[in-house]
Image (cartoon, rainbow, N blue to C red):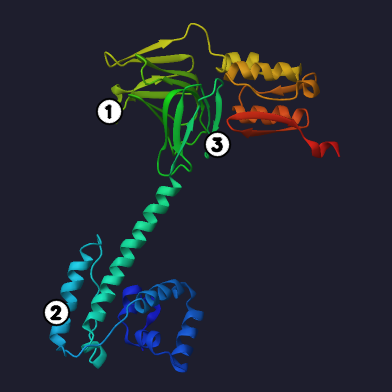
Amino acid sequence: MANYDNFEIEDFLQDDSFIDWIFHENAESNAFWTTFLSDHPEKRTLIEKARAILISINVKPHDDQLSDAEINLRVKLIQDQAFRQVPDKQAPIVKIYQRQWFKTAAVFLVFISIGFVAYQILTKQDNRITQDVLNKLVKISNTSKKSKFVQMNDGSLAVLTPGSEMEFPSTFKGKERNVYLRGEAFFEVHKDHEHPFLVHSQNMITRVLGTSFTVKAFKNAAEFKVIVNTGKVWVYDQKTKPTAEKKDVVIVLTPNQQVTYNRNVLQFKKDTLMHPLLLSKEVADKELNFTNIPFSTVISKLNVAYGIQIEYNKQKLGDLRITALLAEHPLNEKVELICRAVNAKYRFADGRIIIEEDASTNK
């Protein structure tokens, strides 16, 4: 009896005892394979796949008798040709048995080989399709007259202005987090030093690890801009990938700096802003840290800072006074903190932030 511990699908497809069990079940073979599967549950999937390939082939014996040499030659030719379709896969060695049904049905072995190849190709296609589904781009278009709030699965946030559109994977995979923007958006990127965040916008690529910034890149505009609130940002032409030897192709921006890309002359111009941005640290420390301030005032400050409209019941919540240090938190955490302060809850719906009374606290 063969040692089945290290068998793969092709080994099962070529094993005399396994084939007998599939086509001529009896008490003895059933007992053996039941015990084997019980002892080796990790082999169950392989065995089921091998079984499926075998039983899907309807073999009809014919009268022509083939010699062992002819059988070997035909099977080898088919396998050599078929396995060339599967990269990095060598054709398995086929055992030719001296049994009559093998001699009278060489086509059977041929179809096993083809079936195995087909299974591998289909499996690879299924894996590829699954991967495509997992990485399918989510497309968000803002056709309204108000900015739209966008969440990404890594915790990064974006505020998409009217007339703008962005695409991003439903789940970020690979070494980079790639987002595609047409128009204008403000980004607060979740820090992840192992997976840079890249915004592709017209002719520019903006690369960050974790920071906040605005990208303006409307399709028909003569100029594109990147404006940095916090952290450090790299900006470069999409045709030029920066390397250790080509660092000069990158424009490095720090807080309260911007770069303008003129698409007519294909040049970048870097500037320092005359007035610090509202969300830059020095301004945010003054404007977004609150002590005994009405809830309505806090909401107004956030609306101005992010260019959004947070919805809430002003009559019930507006006059409540809160104390909260929000300057160093991203938008979703800012909202979470002020909601805790007034026993409220928030939700994101259709690009909006909605704050509501928490009914559970009133019971």
Q: Residue at x 25, y 87 (%)?
A: 61
Spatial CA span between label 1 and label 2: 53 Å
Q: Nearer the viewer, residue 248 or 314?
A: 314
Earlier-in-chain disc, 3 versus 2:
2
Spatial CA span between label 3 and label 2: 60 Å
Under mark 1, the amino acid is: Lys
Q: Residue at x 72, y 29 (%)?
A: 339
User: Mark 2 Cα within 10 Å, few/some/many (few <14, many 20+)?
Assistant: few
Give the quarter of the figure containing the C terminus.
Answer: top right
Give the quarter of the figure containing the N terminus.
Answer: bottom left
Q: Read off the residue under disc 1.
A: 239
Q: Read off the residue under disc 2.
A: 73
Earlier-in-chain disc, 3 versus 1:
3
Please report contact status of discs 1 and 2: CB closer than 8 Å, yes or no. no
Under mark 3, the amino acid is: Gly
Q: Read off the residue under disc 3.
A: 155
User: Mark 3 Cα within 10 Å, few/some/many (few <14, many 20+)?
Assistant: few
Q: Residue at x 78, y 28 (%)?
A: 342
Closest to the camera, between mark 1 and mark 2, is 2
Residue 72 visible in image:
yes
Q: Against 6, is 17 above or below?
A: below
Earlier-in-chain disc, 1 versus 2:
2
